[in-house]
Image (tube, helix red, strand yellow):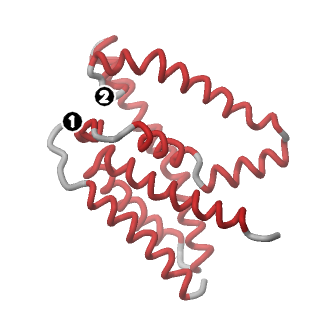
Amino acid sequence: MAAVDYVVVLVFFAMLLGVSAWVTRRHASAEQFFLAGRKLTWPFVGFALIAVNVDAAYAINFAGSGYRFGILYGHYEVGATLCLVVLVFALLPLYRASGIYTMPQLLKKRYGESTHLFYSVIAILATCLTLPVGTNAISKTLSALTGYNLWLFAAIVVPVCVALAITGGLTTVAYSNVVMGVIILGLSLIHISEPT
């Protein structure tokens, strides 16, 4: 990598950490932590959700798989869209009316403490099993670009991401997703506009 590449990567991470630190100033209640104090507007939340789902790895993966396997590979997205429509129009109003913030909270209210505990353990295990995949991907990418050991990047990325999510809750996650989404969208538009 050239010096300008290092500068771009450092500016990106500094901007992401700066935005995250700025929005993590106050979180006094569970509502502020899990619902961002109910201050995020629907366009902001919608863009954050799209940004987190349509990241660079997703775009590269789906483009390559679509080329290799054809349109069949897109069936997942059609199914996911239908599930989101049901969630938004049928289930979300019920959740909002009952004041539920999280899935474990819903299970506790509906089925009792044992189901709540069981789901919480499964969710934590699933996160612990899937987190290394993303960590490995970003660490390998940064290692290939810089020539440094991938364990160095894993040792930096994991604590920073965990600290930001724990200290900032949904507000930090949403803002960082929007920042990354704007960057991905901007770079995609630049790439599309380049002459071939």
Residue position for label 2: 101
Quarter of the figure with residue 136: bottom right
Q: Depth check: 113 or 93 in front?
A: 93
Quarter occupied by the C terminus: bottom right
Query: Mark 1 Cα within 10 Å, few/some/many (few <14, many 20+)?
Result: few
Tag 2 and tag 1, C-beta contact below 8 Å:
yes
Q: Is residue 118 above or below residue 20?
A: above
Q: Residue furthest top?
A: 111
Residue 150 horizontal side relative to residue 96, left or right? right
Residue depicted at x 45% and y 58%: 179
Query: Which of the labelled discs sits on residue 180, or is there none?
Result: none
Position in image of residue 150 (x %, y %): 53, 70
Which quadrant: the N terminus? bottom right
Q: Can you give x and y, in whole percent of width and height, for residue 126 in the image?
A: 47, 37
State the residue position of label 1.
Answer: 30
| Disc 2 from disc 1: Cα separation | 8 Å
Question: Is 112 rendered above or below residue 85?
Answer: above
- Tell me the residue at 34%/61% (across/down): 19
Amino acid beneath label 2: Tyr
Most extreme residue toward the bottom is: 3
**Location of residue 30 (image quadrant):** top left
The type of residue carrying mark 1 is: Ala
